[in-house]
Amino acid sequence: MATLTARAANPIETLVQHKRVVNAMAWLDKNLDWITEQQIAITEIPAPEFHEAARAAFVAKILAASGLDVRTDSAGNVIGERHGSDDKDVVLLVAHLDTVFPAGTDVHVKRSNGRLLAPGISDDGAGLAALVATARALDQAQLKTQMTIAFAADVGEEGEGNLRGIRELMAAYNGHLRAVIALDGAATDYVTTIGLASRRLDMQITGPGGHSWSDFGAPNPITALARGIVQFSRTRVPDEPRTTFNFGVIEGGTSVNSIPSEASVKVDLRSEDDAELARLESELRKSFASAVDEEMAAAVPGSEGLKLKVSVIGVRPGGKLAPGAALLNAIENADRYLGNRSRLERSSTDANLPLSQGIPAIAIGAGGQGGGSHSLEEWYNPAGRELGLKRAMLTALMIAGVQP
């Protein structure tokens, strides 16, 4: 099995003179309109968390038409393999199918002043477009690599998906992955080399419920929830290591004149330090337990009690790419050749999982410009997208190696 070192990656000067690499880059330049059309078509297929199948089927057809050996795994990931001369070693390119937007969201793409406007058009419509474009470019150039390149459109990257797609891919390629490149969003001015650890919890409070008039004074799960939110929000978080929390979704109640029998809030906790993350989770649990006690103390004596249930709905491990890794050397060489300036970043992406397992991984943008991620005002401008496309392809080829 090959050992990956900085010296093992093809020098960029040699790589970009390879006739078939030149042809692959030329194909990207000539087919930018086609790539944008695929991005629009992909974006207009709704893909809420846990409902990515329709979009997956569309991407599978594009990958199959690019000469790949395509399959869909048990998690719902679409994988297309371009086999290398050494089929034991694999470079994985991955872009996520799912979006943060619920079913029923209008995902029709509109155009305005050179921009494409639609929820999910950049995150991760841009990444998925780059994935299929790279596969098509290599096929059209008839370029053969030493390692196998696997192109995966995976599920469960966002929110409560809890990285279930990349987890399945890691298990499937166990022992064979030499590098993972996650294509996420548009920006080319960064390279994510550190996975930001996070925890997501569902804080649920249940009680007897009742009528707002006749049962006034009974403990109210929504009031207890509010007490917990306010109490935990007083928790001090350090600037260094950077630590954050967010109350993202609140649910509960059936009518304005009913004391609810249930209420819940979903909480996102993040930190650059695992110990700080653990402290934050502990404080969250204490705050809500205390809030339940406070609500019961304020209730009519003899009231039926409230119950607190805490469920961990997401765990993203952290990790870091080694400073001398060949993958880092490859992206830096690609940037130098393309005249692109980028900085190293920490973020929460599909790269988290391989990094946590010691597998070289990065997350990079797919080119163009984007903004408004995770909002209904999300936008993408394809101008200059060829930079990101070539950057991703050259990085993958430097690791995979090109056959003469």
Image: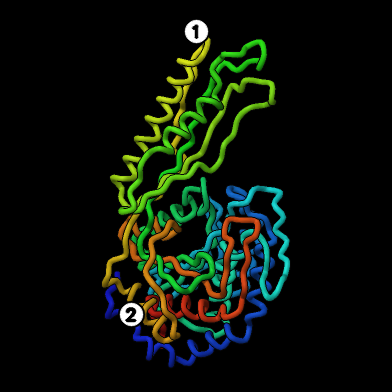
Which residue is label 1 attached to?
301
In terms of depth relative to the viewer, which is nearer, 308 or 44?
308
The amino acid type found where label 2 is placed reads: Ala
In the shown orientation, is residue 361 left or right of residue 303? left
Q: How many numbered callouts?
A: 2
Task: Examine the rendering and report whether any part of residue 317 can be seen.
Answer: no
Mark 1 and mark 2 residues within 8 Å of each other at the beta carbon: no
| Residue 264, horizontal then vertical, whole percent | 54, 32
Whole-percent x, y for residue 380 in the image: 62, 69
Residue at the spot x=45%, y=38% of the render? Answer: 201
Residue for point 67% across, 14% down = 213
Residue 6 pos. (x, y %)? 28, 77
Looking at the image, residue 279 sits to the left or right of residue 376; the answer is left
| Label 1 CA crowd tier, 10 Å (few <14, some 14–19, many 20+) | few
- Give the distance between the C-alpha atoms of the residues marked 1 and 2, in whole angstroms: 72 Å
- Badge 2 is on which residue? 9
Residue 262's label in the rendered image is none
Circle 2 packing at 10 Å, graded few (<14), some (14-19), many (20+), is many
Residue 257 visible somewhere in the drawing: yes
Q: Height in image: 313 above or below 304?
A: below
Mark 1 or mark 2: which comes first in sequence?
A: 2
The secondary structure type at the circle numbered 2 is: loop
Q: Residue at x 43, y 45 (%)?
A: 245
**Vertical side of 161 occupied by 109: above or below:** below
